[in-house]
Image (cartoon, rainbow, N blue to C red):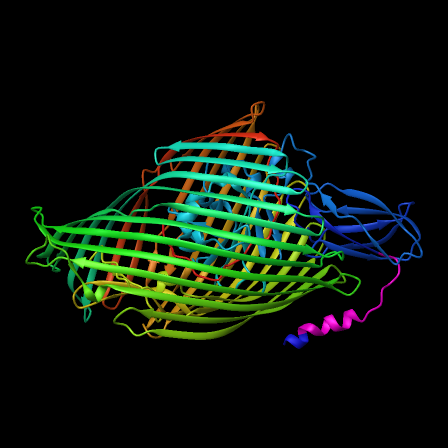
Amino acid sequence: MVALLLLPFTLFAQQGNPAGMITGRVSDSLSHKPLDFITVTALAETGNPLASTYTNTDGVYTLTLKYNGPVRLVYSFIGYAKTEVTVQLNANQQTLQVKEIHLAPNLKNLDEVKIMAARKLLVQKPGMLIYNAGNDASNKGGTAADVLRKAPVLSVDARGNVTMRGSSNIKILVDGKYSGQMARSPADALNMMPADVIQSVEVITTPSAKYDAEGAAGVINIITKKGGKKLSGALEAAASNWEQVLNPRLAVANKKWNINANAHLHRLRMKSESDYQRNNIDNGTINSVLNQYIVRDNVAPHGSASVTVDYAADSLNQLSFGVTSWFGNWPDNSRLNSRVTQPDGTILEQYNQAVFSRGKYLGADFNIGYIHKFKKPGQELNLLAQISPSRDNSNYQSGQTSLADALLYKELNNSLTKNRELTFQADYFQPIGNSNKYTLESGAKIISRKVSNNYEVFGSTDADPNVLQPIAGRTNLFNYKQDVVAGYLILKFNLPGNWYAETGARVEGTFLKGEFQSGSEPFSRNFANIVPTATISKKISDAQTLNLSYTKRLTRPYIWDLNPNVNASDPKNITTGNPTLQPEIAHQGELSYSIAFNSGLSFNPAVFWKQTNNSIEDITVVGADGISVTSKQNLAANRQFGLNLSATIPLTSKWGLNTNTNVTRLDFKSTALQIISNGWGAEFNINTTYKLPHALSLQAFGSYNTRTITLQGYQTRNYYYSFAAKKEITSQKITLTLATVNPFTKAVKQTAVVRSSSFYSSSLNREYNQAIKLTVGWEFGKLFKQTESKKIENDDVKGQKKG
């Protein structure tokens, strides 16, 4: 296969150098990212057309023409101002290199429709949709979770847990790099990132071979804002009945240096209630009933800080360095009333329980990168390295009491997790032949992870419930090592008739080792995966594009899924890891269409299909003792297909609307458990903004999810809505935003049902997030502009779903 991929390279390298060749590169003036599908037209002095082409995915174009004299080059694309330059092509000059062209967003109607005319909110590219969050004024004062609620294809619940087309197996990157904070807990990390630092969100539904194969549903890449002027910055403060936030930002830049720093301090209160009932079944007959009422009310102080430094030694060489740290305490205190009865209501067991927990964590990502651009447009070498140390110190102490407050049982679970991750990556981009219509991308990557979890559990006895004794069977030291070696190769073709195609493959070798200090036997597993990807795209016109993509994905379990430390804070419903867990593999394809007009109107429909084998699912079993145990297992497969539609609609010059719709059919099948579960689900959201005089605007957002099918049951509907008013004091560069979340709903209710032949459980959950929030933002210096520096992209491990 590699030989076949390299064959075009051999053939094109043998081609001659045609006369009259004009080549160059086009990029966005704000993001400095290369722009693909830009139409480039060559005109004679008289205005007669000589030749026409469009840029490839690296922003590179090549025109071949037989002409001697001045040539007018016109660059055009929907949403950007038309740009024209004049060059001189001489008869004895075979190749003319044009200076890089920076296209500016179309600001024609900036005063009336700033958001829609400055830059489209939604942009479609092969295999991905881009949500330009920096152009959505309604994001002021929110978090990254609020931003992702408005991004296409995604769904975010009240706690910040993200799913893509119904799956939570997503890899979330920040500026294209692995984030230890996201890997630890995506929901927590998203609630720690302020919305105001986010420039755009790339929702990559069919990642190419360049990306790590991990992330069965896809990849989310959050692009943050960078400074582009000598000195700029911002200070944002927000307060509500549930949270208090402070977000400072500072950027300093000159011709060679670009330094950006930001911090986030956040105090978040979370409250929820649950009514849980489980019928335990034996041979089709209910033999006992468990009823629980659980209240959680926690305050989580946390924060993060990051500094990035980019140094351009010259036009061909760039160095970058970055450090991001995060810290905080994410407790999970609860009060529980538990009662076990016979079917006729006779009480068998009854107690109250209080759980006091601590979730302290500290971590950092240190990365360094080097980019070398060759004189030939599109030829580039990237070298990247990153180290990510972190520690997570968590524990819980539970106490069971009788209804008369007599102590029955105490338990203490201490857990210390230390993680160290090293990553080295190299990527090379080589245009093939002299026409630059073909590009070869290749790269290699090494990831080394070492994780240890030292856990010890103490419990009391019936004889003396006040004295804690070590529980040897639940105390251990778990060491886990995971090494990944990968390489990839991609060929990109810019074909006649505005066709584009790319094909590639990634080979990954994974080496796992796990050992325990005592008890369980050590384990090791080695496996290799070949991950093919392919995309074909047709640019029908400047406004219309059609894409067809295929990719193979896998999901590796991480220590959170493997760790056998039992969480028995609820002794009737315990959870544990599974050291024998295997990776899951998914095949997925997508057909998408995009149409956009100068008015700002755009539609992005897509149909998709995904087949997941050996899928990792939460499995709950109930023993004869009436205790349920939940862990992840490879006992099922699932098939998914559906439609998603994203649209931006300018209703008037002052009123705009954007909406996302996902409709999905999900089929689960487990031969081992004898389960077949299937059904349709849908997700809708709508976001609208209306501009009033005197720099005042109103915004409304709402999302609604229908019933969601799971392997062992389903979750009922849930919804989220908000309203906001924003006032800009332009002379002082101050923005005031008053927002309300779920103003007519004290608590959002959702029921989760889990069932098997031995039990039927139903949990009615109420999330309290009714809020009113005031945000004050002040900016100094010029408005933030987006620059780009290469970072590590470790998107290959499954993050822990928390929040």
Q: Give above or below for 386 relative to 531.
A: above
Q: Is residue 16 magenta?
A: yes
Residue 470 seen by the camera:
yes
Which of the two residues, 476 or 634, is positioned nearer the viewer here?
Answer: 476
Residue beneath the point at 59% across and 69% down: 505
Q: Quadrant of the N terminus?
A: bottom right
Q: Is residue 578 magenta?
A: no
The residues colored magenta run: 5-21
Residue drawn 67% across the image and 61% down it: 429
**Can residue 169 be seen here?**
no
Q: Is residue 142 left or right of residue 97?
A: left
Question: Where does residue 71 sit, x and y in percent of width and height?
Answer: 88, 48
Number of numbered markers = 0
Query: Residue 706 placed where, x, y %?
Result: 40, 52
- The correct choice, above or below, for 56 with respect to 74 in the image is below
Please tell me which residue lies in front, 417 or 219: 417
Residue 570, quarter of picture: bottom left
Placement of 109 over or under 36, stated as above or below: above
514 horizontally vs 656: left or right: left
Q: Where does residue 395 sit, x and y in percent of width and height?
A: 26, 52
Q: Is residue 475 above or below residue 277?
A: below
